[in-house]
Structures are given as C-alpha cells and as structure tokens.
Image: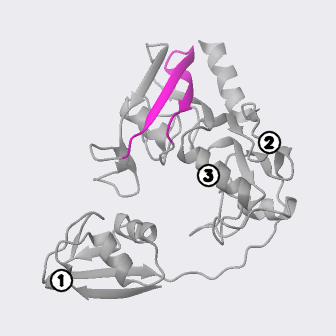
C-alpha cells in the first residue's frame, strides 16, 4: 500500500534541495529515509525523477509516494548461529551464506536479528527497532565474520570506528579473469547508478571508496584475491571489481548473465575483522574460515589448473 503527498513549490521554497524540503514537510521522516525514497524513484518533480540535491523551482509540483510502514514485532527464532566470541559488550558472528542481516521488505523473519534475539538476550537497542545490536551488515549472500553490539556504549564505539575507517575488514573473493598485478588499489567513488537505481556504480559525484587488493592465486579463467576495505560503501567490493572488468564470480547484480561454476550468488567471504574493544581498548582480531562451497570451488579449480 502506498500513500501520496503532494506539494506545490512556492516562491519562498525556490532553490531548496529536494531532500531537505521534503524532510521539513514530512513530519517523522528522516532525511536519509527521504533520500531512499528519491533514490528508489518514489518522488517526482512535475512527473520527472530527480536527485536528492535537485534545487526546486517555484511553481513545480512534488509528488511523493510513501510505502505503508509494516508494524511487526520481532520474534526470537531458534536458528543455528555460530558465535565465534562473546563477552558482556560484543559478540562476533560467523554469518552463513543466504542469511539476511535484519528484517526488511520481503524478509520479515528468519534473519540474523531473529537468531540473535534467541541466542543473545542483551543486545543494544539504540540502532533502530528492526536492527538491535547491528553495527554493520553483510549482503545476504556474503558470508563471514561480523560484530554485534551488546551495550549502547559498545554500539556507539564500534559505529565511530566504522565511521573513522579504523576497523580492519578483509575479504576473500573469486573474480573473473586474470588480474596481472599482485597488489593494487582501487580508488573510485561510488554512488547510485544513473541507469539502474537498484545498483551502485562508480560515478564522478559519488562518495570516496578505496579498496586494496592482493592476488592469492591465479587459475585458468579466475583469480583468487584478498581485499581490504579502507571505506565501507554499499556493495563496494562488488562494484569496484566489476568496474575493473573482473566481477565477482556468481554475482547476480554486477556479474555476467551467464552463470559460472554453478554459482548464483557472489563468491565473497568476510574472512577477517579487527577492532578496538569498546570497553578495554584492546585491539582484537577475529577470523573465519572459507565456507565449504568456496573451498570446494577452489579444490576443483586447482585440479584443472
């Protein structure tokens, strides 16, 4: 269900940014929520999609379509969950492939949050009704290590570390083609794709995104790499390597239409997470072994290499 809001731009509002104007007019909706509506083409100015930064003109009509909020109560669910480490402040989780991190449209249950509520009773609640304890997320089909906050202090500390890019995050991925350089850095800004609003892309006016990579092994048609994120943009690794024409094997959004190695999801694993403990100040590192499917792919590739 959608409800609509219409606004006629007056002389006084001329020159205002579209997202700021709507945030002022639509009580109870944050600017980030407004931006998401605009990015998802749910806002039109005189019938045309515009960017959040668009400057309004007198006489224009703004139409916003707003999805009805689904009122749900999160339920703890007895879902198998590997907890690598846990104390009174944080928990380190090894997320499996195929698990959504927090409830959203199309996935209201069987998420990591539902599992966390069952296994951990004292999650921090200040990161939103549907995301208790969640500091950062992994895509549904990306596996590996991630941290969860058990106190509000821990959540604030870890969120600041992510904001300051001081958390160490390393991923292992299998990409198409042969990368010749043993080491490399991709410094290319990422923003919403101008041709497909469901995708992110390297764009001139995007947010800074930096990925360092190291080649671990080369095969006939593929390269195994380790990637260290210096920033944390949406789909950063997937976008950066597609930009280099070395998309991640199996990536349904940024990879080739033809499936390779039988994969229908990206072969991408969060293998290492390093952080400063929010209470003790100690630097801690946690690792996660490659999931079985990933190891089997590599074993087969080595046989035929």
Residue 244, position in %: x, y? 37, 29
Disc 2 and disc 3 in contact, CB within 8 angstroms: no
Instruction: Using the numbered discs, state the Cα–Cα distance from disc 2 to disc 3 in whole angstroms.
Output: 16 Å
**What's the magenta region?**
207-231
Residue 228, position in %: x, y? 56, 30
Q: Nearer the viewer, residue 67 or 35?
A: 35
Looking at the figure, which quarter contains the C terminus?
A: top right
Locate residue 263: give its quadrant.
top right
User: Which labelled disc corresponds to residue 280?
Assistant: 2
Alpha-carbon neighbours of circle 1 within 10 Å: few (<14), some, or many (≥20)? few
Disc 1 and disc 3 in contact, CB within 8 angstroms: no
Residue at the spot x=47%, y=31% of the render? Answer: 211
Residue at the spot x=16%, y=81% of the render? Answer: 60
Residue at the spot x=40%, y=71% of the render? Answer: 34
Decide if residue 169 is in sight here: yes
- Choose mark 1 or mark 2, whichever is in front: 2
- Choose mark 2 or mark 3, whichever is in front: 2
Give the side of residue 281 with respect to residue 200, left or right: right
Instruction: Using the numbered discs, state the Cα–Cα distance from disc 1 to disc 2 in whole angstroms.
Output: 53 Å
Residue 47, position in %: x, y? 21, 77
Q: Which element type, helix, strand or loop, lies under badge 2?
A: loop
Residue 304 included in the magenta stretch of the image: no
Alpha-carbon neighbours of circle 2 within 10 Å: few (<14), some, or many (≥20)? few
Mark 1 highlights which residue?
Answer: 12
Instruction: Using the numbered discs, state the Cα–Cα distance from disc 1 to disc 3 in whole angstroms.
Output: 38 Å
Mark 3 highlights which residue?
Answer: 159
Residue 227 included in the magenta stretch of the image: yes
Disc 1 and disc 2 in contact, CB within 8 angstroms: no
């Amino acid at each position: 269900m959608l409800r609509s809001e219409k606004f006629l731009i007056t002389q006084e509002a001329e020159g205002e940014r579209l997202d700021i104007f709507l945030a002022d007019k639509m009580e109870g909706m944050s600017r980030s929520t407004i931006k998401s509506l605009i990015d998802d083409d749910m806002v039109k100015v005189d019938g045309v999609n515009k960017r959040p930064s668009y400057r309004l003109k007198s006489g224009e009509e703004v139409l916003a379509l707003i999805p009805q909020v689904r009122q749900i109560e999160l339920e703890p669910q007895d879902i198998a969950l590997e907890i690598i480490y846990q104390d009174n402040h944080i928990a380190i989780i090894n997320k499996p492939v195929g698990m959504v991190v927090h409830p959203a449209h199309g996935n209201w249950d069987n998420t990591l949050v539902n599992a966390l509520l069952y296994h951990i009773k004292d999650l921090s609640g200040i990161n939103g009704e549907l995301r208790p304890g969640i500091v950062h997320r992994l895509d549904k089909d990306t596996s590996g290590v991630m941290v969860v906050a058990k106190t509000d202090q821990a959540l604030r500390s870890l969120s600041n570390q992510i904001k300051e890019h001081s958390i160490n995050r390393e991923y292992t991925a299998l990409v198409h083609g042969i990368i010749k350089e043993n080491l490399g850095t991709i410094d290319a800004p990422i923003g919403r794709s101008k041709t497909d609003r469901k995708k992110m892309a390297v764009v001139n006016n995007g947010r800074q995104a930096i990925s360092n990579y190291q080649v671990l092994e080369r095969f006939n048609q593929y390269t195994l790499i380790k990637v260290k994120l210096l920033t944390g943009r949406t789909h950063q690794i997937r976008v950066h390597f597609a930009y280099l024409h070395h998309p991640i094997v199996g990536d349904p959004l940024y990879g080739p239409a033809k499936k390779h190695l039988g994969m229908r999801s990206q072969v991408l694993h969060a293998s290492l997470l390093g952080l400063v403990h929010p209470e003790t100040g100690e630097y801690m590192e946690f690792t996660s072994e490659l999931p079985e499917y990933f190891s089997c792919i590599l074993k087969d590739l080595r046989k035929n290499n």
